[in-house]
Amino acid sequence: MRSKSSKKAKPGRKPASRSAAARKLGALIDKKKALMGVIGMGYVGLPLALGLCRSGFRVLGFDTDNKKVTALNKGNSYISHISSEDIGSFVRGEFFSATADFSRLGEADCITICVPTPLNDQKEPDIGYVARTCEEIAKTLRSGQLRSEERRVGKECRSRWAPYH
């Protein structure tokens, strides 16, 4: 069964109009003016952040590990398959910076959560990291922000997104 949002517009009918906040965010993304926030600078988040930089977006990376934040802001990689040269060029070009200050989440137009979801003893995903991250996002969430989640559980990769208006 299709959800309402996946129904195709009937011929002769206009699709539902987007809110002013959604239109503004869409324009920022189209013009590559949106600031992207990526939470979790590990094996999923850091490559995503660098890919966004390569696509022309400015990225603010978030992590609770101050050693990672310091290394990234110096242009240094701690992941073997990611070059320090790539990170350094984006830092110097002011496309990328990292922070442990989660109060800055409000600066980002789009936020992607890339935190661990390890399996517990029952082989079910432990979403504790995700829940704590969502609590931090809730403190600064504003109209017009887009939140998405990228996570890997076992061999599966899951993705979800939700606009906030």
Image (spheres, rainbow, N blue to C red):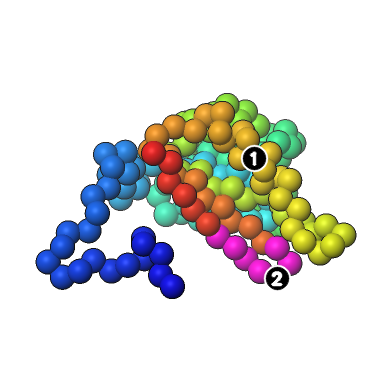
Q: Position of residue 32 (x, y in %)?
A: 35, 46
Residue at the disc numbered 2? 155
Where is residue 43? Give x, y as percent: 68, 56
Main SS class of the magenta portion in the image: strand
**Marks 1 and 2, how far apart at CA:** 22 Å
Q: In this view, does 120 lie above or below 57?
A: below
Quarter assignment of residue 6: bottom left
Q: Residue at x 43, y 46 (%)?
A: 163
- Regarding mark 1 in the picture, which secondary structure is present there? helix
Q: Quadrant of the C terminus?
A: top left
Say which amino acid is labelled 1: Thr
Residue 132, by quadrant, is top right
> Amino acid type of disc 2?
Lys
Q: Residue furthest right?
A: 121
In the picture, the disc for residue 133 is 1
**Residue 39 location (% of width, % of height):** 60, 43
10 Å crowding of disc 1: few (<14), some (14-19), many (20+): some
Q: Name the residue rendered at 63%, 57% in the picture.
A: 151
